[in-house]
Image (cartoon, rainbow, N blue to C red):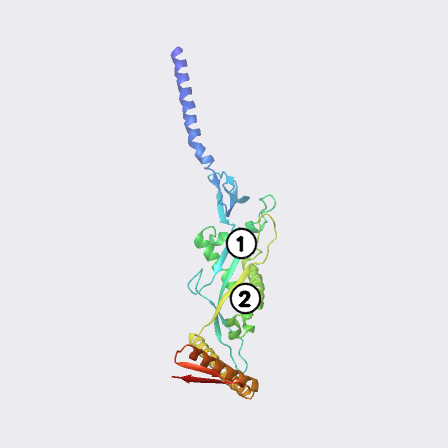
């Protein structure tokens, strides 16, 4: 009897030990290590699994610590100012916008110009007052657009912008067709042109992306306010470099002609002034006095020179 009791106790201890081991092994599966959102990123926490499906739960604020369960997911998206930079040397792209400008007076067709722009914006990361609103802009952006392109990764983010920002810029460039090539290249109309360009761009970007998902650089995710994306024209060049060279030669010739005219006008003015002086008795007397002064200075410096001033004020110079 004692032996049987000892055997039962032994089996009980083995079972306890077995379940303890199983519990320890299960701990990592129930909870993952803590995660911290980067200071310039927002985390979208999704409940996933057999019972949860794929449901948004909450947003992780920048710098916030969270404890994701192993079978759930957090997608981190940028909360800082982003740019789309079109530059000749290659920013985000070196492919400039090609615009056929307004024809010059007397011309039937306008010249083509290359327009380089920079777009500054923030992703609309507003997530509701409690950071749990499934209908907030950031959640809707992710579900309608971001997830499709894997925009939580650098390649996916770039792909997303290529399919939203770039087509919107292509649409907005048509507003520049109301200016001549020279006006655009010289930059005199940029202030006016940028406003029309930016307004059209913002409207088209919202249409293409499906919502008000992109805001200006002053966006604050604590508030729902979303200002317009900032677009600036950085540079405009003639597409045909030969035209630019011809414009340069034309400008050089114009400046040279203007300089020749200025020189000729100066010569005429000097001649007129000299003629007027020769007819001025006071000026003539001043010139005579100046020459006498120079003669006196030269004589005073020489031991072989004698000056005699007569009663009328005349000066006689004798050298020996």
Q: Is residue 18 above or below residue 156?
A: above
Name the residue nearer the viewer: 137 or 20.
137
Q: Between tags 1 and 2, which lies in front? A: 1
Q: Position of residue 172 (x, y in %)?
A: 54, 66
Q: Which mark is residue 86?
A: none
Name the residue nearer the viewer: 1 or 122.
122
Mark 1: give few (<14), some (14-19) or many (20+) Cα within 10 Å.
many
Residue for point 55% across, 68% down: 190
* Rendered image quadrant of residue 295: bottom left
The answer to whether residue 265 is visible is: no
Q: Position of residue 220 (x, y in %)?
A: 58, 50
Give the left or right position of residue 213, taking residue 92 as reference.
Answer: right
Q: Give the residue pinned by disc 1.
A: 122
Q: Position of residue 44 (x, y in %)?
A: 52, 46
Q: Give the residue pinned by disc 2.
A: 172
Alpha carbon distance from label 1 to label 2: 19 Å
Q: Position of residue 21 (x, y in %)?
A: 41, 27
Name the residue nearer the viewer: 276 or 95.
276
The answer to whether residue 236 is visible is: yes
Q: Secondary structure at mark 2?
A: helix
């Amino acid at each position: 009897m004692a032996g049987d009791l000892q055997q039962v106790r032994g089996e009980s201890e083995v079972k306890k030990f077995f379940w303890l081991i199983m519990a320890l092994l299960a701990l990592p599966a129930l909870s993952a290590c803590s995660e911290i959102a980067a200071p310039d990123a927002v985390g979208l926490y999704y409940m996933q699994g057999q019972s949860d499906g794929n449901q948004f739960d909450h947003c992780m604020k920048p710098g916030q610590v969270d404890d994701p369960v192993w079978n759930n997911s957090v997608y981190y998206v940028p909360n800082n100012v982003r740019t789309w930079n079109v530059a000749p040397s290659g920013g985000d792209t070196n492919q400039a916008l090609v615009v056929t400008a307004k024809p010059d007076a007397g011309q039937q067709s306008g010249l083509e110009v290359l327009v380089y722009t920079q777009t500054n914006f923030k992703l609309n990361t507003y997530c509701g007052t409690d950071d749990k609103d499934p209908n907030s802009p950031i959640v809707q952006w992710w579900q309608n657009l971001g997830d499709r392109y894997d925009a939580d990764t650098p390649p996916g983010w770039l792909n997303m912008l290529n399919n939203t920002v770039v087509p919107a810029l292509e649409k907005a460039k048509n507003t520049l067709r109301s200016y001549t090539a020279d006006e655009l290249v010289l930059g005199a109309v940029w202030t006016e042109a940028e406003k029309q360009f930016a307004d059209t761009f913002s409207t088209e970007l919202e249409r293409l992306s499906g919502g008000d998902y992109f805001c200006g650089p002053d966006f604050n995710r604590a508030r729902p306010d979303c200002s317009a994306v900032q677009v600036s024209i950085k540079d405009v060049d003639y597409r045909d470099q030969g035209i630019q060279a011809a414009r340069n030669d034309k400008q050089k010739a114009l400046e040279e002609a203007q300089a020749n005219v200025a020189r000729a006008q100066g010569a005429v003015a000097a001649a007129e002034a000299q003629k007027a002086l020769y007819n001025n008795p006071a000026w003539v007397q001043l010139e005579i006095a100046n020459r006498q002064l120079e003669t006196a200075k030269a004589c005073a410096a020489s031991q072989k020179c004698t000056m005699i001033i007569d009663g009328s004020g005349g000066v006689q110079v004798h050298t020996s």
